[in-house]
Image: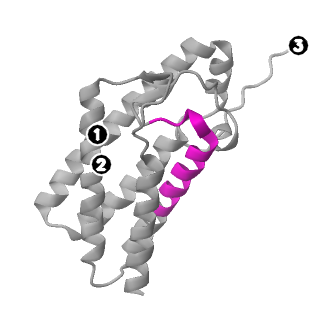
């Protein structure tokens, strides 16, 4: 079971890394964050993935907590892959937005506005649990600080993305924003006005 767990968890990490990464400069990309923030995130996330892989490879047994982390990393990866598919050519690296592709409200985006970011949160949450349960305190401390940075980066990116979309699409985005939760698969319904 240990070998299967390691293989499955590492395969999930590879799929996650491929799905979340898109460093190409695409026409019409708009920067949401400063270049320094984006560069720092691009440097940190492969290190976090490497530490996670190191922890997984060093496991000597599978605990119940490890199954929970597998669920979180798997769910996060599935969300990232689905979000990337639904975004299509609108997908860009975090910290950027495609200004030319239109407002995506289909697929997973009919259920949550920031599905890709939600998937990243799930994955790094699972990874953080694995690291905290198995790595030395100094590694855990470094990872916790790095995860806090990445989480903050994503919150700011999501907020700026929403503001830009509201500016670009006006009432269409406001209506979408008011009916779809940013990070959870919940739709919000307003009561119909009295006639």
Q: Is residue 89 left or right of residue 40?
A: right
Circle 3 Cα neighbour tier, 10 Å, few/some/many (<14 / 14–19 / ≥20): few
Rendered location of residue 160, percent (x, y) = 43, 22
Is 72 located above or below residue 36 in the figure?
Answer: below
Residue 195 got which mark? 3
Q: Residue at x 48, y 66 (%)?
A: 71
- Mark toward the viewer: 3 or 1: 1
Tell me, yes or no, whether the highlighted magenta stretch contains residue 36.
no
- Mark toward the viewer: 2 or 3: 2
Q: Earlier in the sequence, mark 2 or mark 3?
A: 2
Residue 53 got which mark? none
Rendered location of residue 66, percent (x, y) = 38, 73
Residue tagged 1 = 41
- Residue 52 is drawn in which quadrant? bottom left
- CA distance separating discs 1 and 2: 6 Å
Q: Is residue 111 visible?
A: yes
Q: Secondary structure at mark 1?
A: helix
The majority secondary structure of the magenta stretch comes to: helix
Residue numbers of the magenta segment: 73-92
Residues 173 and 20: in front is 20
Whether residues under marks 1 and 2 lie with C-beta atoms below 8 angstroms apart, the answer is yes
Residue ranking furthest to the bottom: 1
Whether residues under marks 2 and 3 lie with C-beta atoms below 8 angstroms apart, the answer is no
Residue tagged 2 = 45
- CA distance separating discs 2 and 3: 53 Å
């Amino acid at each position: 079971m240990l070998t299967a767990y390691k293989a499955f968890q590492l395969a999930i990490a590879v799929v996650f890394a491929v799905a979340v990464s898109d460093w190409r400069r695409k026409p019409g990309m708009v920067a949401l964050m400063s270049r320094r923030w984006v560069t720092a995130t691009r440097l940190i996330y492969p290190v976090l993935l490497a530490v996670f892989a190191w922890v997984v490879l060093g496991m000597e047994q599978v605990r119940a907590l490890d199954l929970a982390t597998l669920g979180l990393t798997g769910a996060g990866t599935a969300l990232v892959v689905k979000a990337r598919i639904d975004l299509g050519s609108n997908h860009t690296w975090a910290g950027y937005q495609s200004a030319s592709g239109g407002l995506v409200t289909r697929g997973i985006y009919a259920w949550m506005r920031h599905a890709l970011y939600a998937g990243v949160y799930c994955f790094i949450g699972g990874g953080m649990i694995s690291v905290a349960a198995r790595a030395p305190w100094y590694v855990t401390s470094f990872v916790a600080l790095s995860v806090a940075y990445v989480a903050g980066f994503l919150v700011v990116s999501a907020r700026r993305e929403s503001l830009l979309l509201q500016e670009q699409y006006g009432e269409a985005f406001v209506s979408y924003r008011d009916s779809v939760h940013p990070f959870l698969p919940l739709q919000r319904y307003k009561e119909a006005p009295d006639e």
